[in-house]
Amino acid sequence: MTRRPDAGARPVERRAVLPATAGALLGVAGCTGRTTAGRAGTATPAPTGSIPSPAGSSSSVPAALPRTTPWRPGPTEIHPEVKRRAVELVEAIGAWHTGKGGPAAARAEVAALHLPTALVAQAGPLLPSADEAVLQVIDAQYGGILADSASVLVVCRQWTRHGATVRAGGTTVDVRLARTVSGWTVTALHPARPGAPSAAPRAGVREVLADSRIVLPPAAQADVRSGQVHDSVLTAMRRPAGTYRMYVSVVRSGHPLDVFGTSRPSDHPRGRAFDVRQIDGHAVVDPRTPRSLERFMHGAAAAGSYDVGGLVQLSGGTTPDQFFSDATHHDHVHIGFRD
């Protein structure tokens, strides 16, 4: 998420499919989760931040899909039911057993969640043509949370099987929700569309992609490869990577075009911001995260960010509002740049 909304819009606060069994999928701390009947089973956790092969790659051996693990909202989440609702829909569309793929099957899964089946038509890259698929939610962070509406950015990896070939990919989906008398419902899906990789990547792009201390999910990695991320962001990613292992959640695509609840353009779609969900393996949303969070935020400001938001309200910025904290940013650090 980019900057907090204006005062008038202040915040108020599928699962794994194994060769023989399927596991419900919901992510890591800061994501969402629920097992959906019909496609779910047990799952074995995969190491956080790991990926068997680069996003979009394929391998002819073996033809087995990886195991995934459910995510549950932690006790410090703000309105965890909102994230849970967003993630269960992404899981329902993005994973299936052999012979159970395609729009018709996905619509049946969505109907079982008592959500509009028309959402399936908005799934885009979340619903590729494949014999079988598993999906692992990496994170579910707020793109915005208001009294009666929300944006949840569901960051996921997806593996698909095509005959004897397994392909690794994934996306980020901006899930829009509205509060109704019966609870939160999903109103729209906006999957990430990063664009094609740059034919001649800049040095900063190559350095970020080669740095093992900068962990990028599929859509964020594709954003960097596209060449549409500003040099200020690439520099700011590399600078703290010398001190911390940084788990990025969102860069450019899959983020609301405007600051949620306002008509102000967000820095993210312009390639001038990135969000961080974990620092040295510690989730930003966890209040037990050590003081490295504060040092990290100060380091982001020192790297030139004019807009640093997170779980804690810091002081000592070069401008009165360089640091901020609100309900939307309790689960990630936002780092934005003017140029």
Image (tube, rainbow, N blue to C red):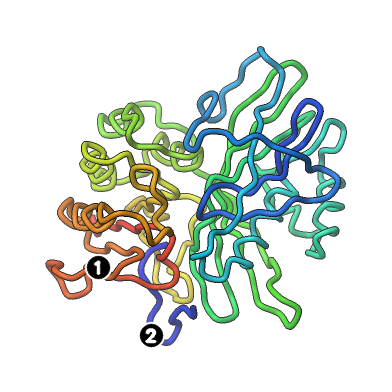
Picture quadrant of residue 208: top left
Q: Secondary structure at mark 2?
A: helix
Q: Earlier in the sequence, mark 2 or mark 1?
A: 2
| Residue at the spot of label 1 | 323
For the residue pair 113 and 7, the one nearer the viewer reads as 113
Identify the residue at image location x=28%, y=47%.
233
| Residue at the spot of label 2 | 7
Check the image and report above or below for 43 versus 113.
above
For the residue pair 38 and 114, the one nearer the viewer reads as 38
Check the image and report above or below for 261 versus 188.
below
Coordinates of residue 265 in the picture (x, y in percent): 40, 66
- The amino acid marked with disc number 2 is Ala
Identify the residue at image location x=40%, y=26%.
199
How many residues crowd mark 2 within 10 Å: few (<14), some (14–19), many (20+)?
A: few
For the residue pair 99 and 45, the one nearer the viewer reads as 45
Q: Could one spot residue 28 in this view of the protein?
A: yes
Indicate left or right for 83 with 296 as reference.
right
For the residue pair 195 and 191, the one nearer the viewer reads as 191
Residue located farthest toward the front when viewing the structure as drawn: 288
